[in-house]
Amino acid sequence: MRPAESLYFDIRGLKYHVRHWSAATAASGAAPRRLVLLHGWMDVSASFQFLVDALGDAWEVFAPDWRGYGLTDWGRSDCYWFPDYVADLDALLDRIQPEAPVNLVGHSLGGNVAALYAGVLPERIARLVNLEGFGMQRTRPDQAPKRYALWLDELRGPPQLKPYAGFSELADRLQKNNPRLQRDRAEFLARHWGRLADDGQVVLRGDPAHKIINPVLYQYEEARACWQSITAPVLWVDADGSEIPKRMKLGAEDYADRRNAHRNLRYVTVKDAGHMLHHDQPERVARLIEEFLQGPGI
């Protein structure tokens, strides 16, 4: 397993943890190829370990724990917002690679943030890989009253995260959520997703406030406008066994409209994988990323 070190940055009032895998080799003394990975909702940066292990040795990889996840400080407000992730990413990239456009890979939440950012500041992105981060469910203005009411109700009784008797039980839960997940990978993830509490139970390394609904409705048209502003080549990767489109009630026409918003896109579906495709098929996903980042423009 490729070793990683922990870096910490002061980002917008929070102590931000970034996992860093150094490049083992670089061709003929050249600088290593640099890559930034962004994890999804209720996940952590260590989730990319299997993907990093499958990448070539010349890649130097950075992966932050988003605010409220892993080893990064929790946020200072009641819930979490997309604009904060975008601003955090901007500050992080200024620390990681301020002098040149970045190769950016995002999964799920991370893919959504990466795609928004790539449209807001297109000059900062060299190439973008979006793994199952194809936007949120469309909303209507008439949903706003009930949405705000639900948010207020959740603030009165904040959610809690289920504790586990031990890391093995958490690994069991991860495999139940994803039957494709191998046992050794589940046990590795459990040690990074969870921590030992004072009472001897294992609790997730995440702020329960992530489960509070966002009171502001997702504006698909705004997200699409950002996607249309992306100038970098984009690799859009989904999984044939992903449950997310069905959960979002995302029809084929709507899904195609999201892809078509990108002016310079390559679209690939990974076989025998679910939403956590970097756990299910890390070798295949790694090859797709490397071929795309090192290949000619689309």
Image (tube, rainbow, N blue to C red):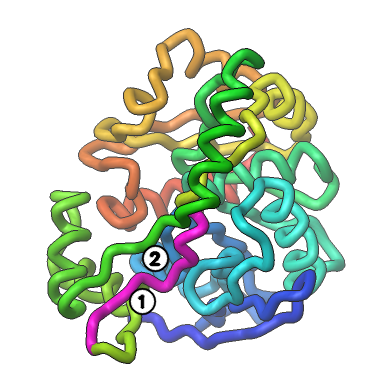
Q: How many numbered marks are there?
A: 2
Q: Is residue 183 left or right of residue 51?
A: left
Question: Mark 1 — residue?
Answer: 192
Residue 146, image quadrant = top right
Quickly name the residue at label 2: 47
Q: Is residue 148 above or below residue 228?
A: below
The span shown in magenta is 200-210
Q: Position of residue 175 (x, y in %)?
A: 16, 57
173 in relation to 275, above or below = below
Quadrant of the drawing holding the C terminus:
top right
Q: Amino acid at mark 1?
A: His
Q: Which of pointers 2 and 1 lies earlier in the amino acid sequence?
A: 2
Which residue is more in the foreground, 238 or 60? 238
Q: At 21% from the left edge and 59% from the top edge, which residue is drawn?
A: 174
* Amino acid at circle 2: Ser
* 61 part of magenta stretch: no
**Residue at horizontal 47%, vertical 8%?**
253
Could you tell me if residue 191 is visible in this image? Answer: yes
Magenta highlight on residue 208: yes
Residue 63 shows up from this direction: no
Mark whose residue sits in front, 2 or 1: 1
* Left or right placement of residue 197 versus residue 3 in this view: left
* Quarter-of-image position of residue 135: top right
Secondary structure beneath dot 2 equals helix
- Numbered mark located on residue 144 in the image: none
The quadrant of the image that shows the N terminus is bottom left
> Gap between marks 2 and 1, in whole Å?
8 Å
Q: Is residue 141 above or below residue 115?
A: above
Q: Residue at x 20, y 50 (%)?
A: 178
Q: Position of residue 84 (x, y in %)?
A: 72, 54
Few, some or many residues within 10 Å of mark 2 (<14, 14–19, 20+): many
Q: Secondary structure at mark 1?
A: helix
